[in-house]
Amino acid sequence: MANEEQSGTGSSPETSTESSTGTKPAKPVDDLVTSQHTVTVDGQELRYTATTGRIVLREEVYADGKFEGLKPKAEVFLTAYTLDDADAADRPVTFAFNGGPGSSSIWLHLGLLGPRRVVSGDVGELAPPPYSIVDNEETLLKYSDVVFIDPVSTGFSRAVEGEKPGDYHGFTRDLESVGEVIRLWTSRNGRWMSPKFLAGESYGTTRAAGLAAHLQQRYGMYLNGVMLISVVLEFGTLDFTPGNDLPYTLFLPTYAAIAHYHGLVPDQTLEELLADAERFAAGRYPNALAQGNRIPADYRAEVVTRLAALTGLSEDYIDRVNLRIEHMRFFGELLRSRRQTVGRIDGRFTGWNADYGSETPERDPSMNAITGPYAAALNHYVRVELGYENDLPYEVLNMDAAKNWSFKEFEGQQIMVADKLAEAMRVNPHLKVYVASGHYDGATPYFATEHTLARLQIPTELTPNIETKYYPAGHMMYIHEDSRVQQSADLGAFITNASNR
C-alpha cells in the first residue's frame, strides 16, 4: 500500500489534558491526522484518504433553565476512509463498530471491511508472530466510504478529565454517544445526502438496531441499510437462566454443526444434519422440556437418544443434565475424551484446559487464536501507516466495561431491541437489513437469530427488506478465507442495491 502524504498531529494523553506549564488542564481538542493511500481492487487502483484520531464529544449544559455552553465529555477514536474524487451525494458511507459490549472496532476494521487486513490464519494454520498486514482486495471501500468507531473506553476512546467513564457503559448512553459521533461526522463532512449504512457485529448488532431508531427519532437521519453480523437482538434467546428453556432449543443446531465439524456425527452432510436438528429443536424437543417431570419415561428416553445422535454427546451426559445442554458446558464436554475444549466464538477451534475435570473451558481457544494478530496489527497500523501517535494502550476489549454494563432501561423485563429495529423499518419502509450468521458460532447461534426475525413486528410487505446469509464459519466468519471473500461480495451487493442510486 502506498502511503503518499500525512498531515495533522496526533497527541499523547499529556498534551491533550495539560498545558505547557502543567498547572492547568488544556481544553481537549480533536487530534485527527490524515494520509493518502491507494489500494488495488479488481485490477482498479482506488485512491483514498484515511483520517484517524479522536474527536471531542460535547454536551449542552443548562443551569436554572439557562444555556451555559457545550461541555467536553469524551474523546472518541475513529478511523474514516473516503474515496478521493467521489461525488459525496452519490457515495455511500458506512459506520461500523463491533460489540462486546466493551469491544473496539478492530475486528471489522482489520478483518473484513477496511482497505488493509491482518493475516491471522485459520484453524490448523494459524499465523505465528510476528504477523503481517496486507492490502484487502475485497475491501468495502469499493462500494462505500467507511467510518470505524470505538465507543468510549475502547480503543483510544476515553472520558475527558473529570468525567466518569462508567457513564457511557450502558445501553442508552452508548447509543447517544455513538449516535453523536455519526451526526458530527456526517455534518462536518457534508454527507447528509449520501446513502448511509450501519454495520455492527455481536453487541454491535444490538447497538445498530437501537441506533436505527435513535438516529431517526433524535436527528431525523433515515438510513438506507443496517448490516447485522452475528446477531443478538433478543437476549432471552441466549440466557441460560433457570426456568428459561428457550436457549436449549435454539442452540441445538449449532451444537450439531460443531459436533459434525469435529467428526462426531459422520453419517450425514452438514445440510442434512442441520435440517434434522432444526426440526427437532422446533418440535419434539421444546415439547419435551415443557413437560418437565411429567414427561413419560419412554418419551424422555427417546429425546435422550435423539439429542446424543445430534450433538455427539453421550446419552449418559444428556440424561445427567436433564436434557438441558448449557453452551459453556457443551464446549468443555464435547471433546473431553480427546482432552480438548472447543471455541465459543468459533466452534471449529480447539484448545486445552489445565484441569480436564473442569466443566467449562478456561478460555475461549478461538479468541486466543486471533487476539494476538489483531492487536499487533492495529497498534502497528495506526502509528506507522496512518501516522497517529498516542501513548494510551489501545483497548481491544475492555472487560471492566463489559462486566459493569448497565441495562437499567430494561429492569424487570427482557433485554431486547428487535422492537426498535421493527419500529425503524415501519417508520422508514425503505430501510434494508442484511443479517449474517455463522454455522459454528456458539455465542449468537443462527437458529436464535431466525427465531427473532420470525417474530419481528413488521408488515408482511416489508419482510423482503431483510436478507439473510449463512457462512461455514463462526462468530467472526471472515476469519475463514472463503467466507471472508463471499461475505465481502454479499455486503457490496447489499450496499449497491440499498443505495437507490
Image (cartoon, rainbow, N blue to C red):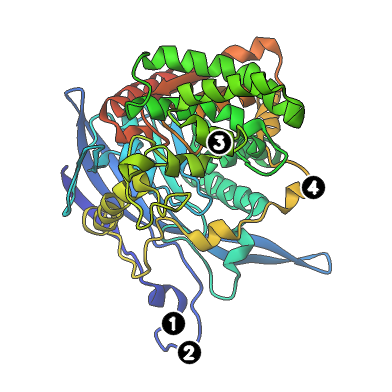
Neighbours of disc 3 within 10 Å: few (<14), some (14-19), many (20+): many
Residue 19's disc is 1
Q: Is residue 445 above or below residue 277?
A: below
Nearer the observer, disc 2 or disc 3?
Answer: 3
Give the total of numbered labels. Answer: 4
Question: Which quadrant of the structure image shows residue 469?
Answer: top left
Residue of label 4: 412
Question: What kind of residue is marked 3?
Answer: Ile
Along the polypeptide, which appears first: circle 1 or circle 3?
1
User: Is the Cβ of the residue at disc 1 closer than 8 Å to that at disc 2?
Assistant: yes
- Mark 2: amino acid: Thr
Per the rendering, the mark at residue 23 is: 2
Q: CA distance from mark 2 to mark 3?
A: 59 Å
Q: CA distance from mark 4 to mark 2?
A: 48 Å
Secondary structure, mark 3, is loop
Q: Position of residue 313 (x, y in %)?
A: 45, 32
Q: Which badge, 2 or 3, comes first in the chain's sequence? A: 2
Residue 230 x, y percent position in the rendering:
48, 33
Quarter of the image for residue 372 reads bottom left
Where does label 3 land, which residue? 325
Q: Earlier in the sequence, mark 4 or mark 2?
A: 2
The image quadrant where one finds the N terminus is top left
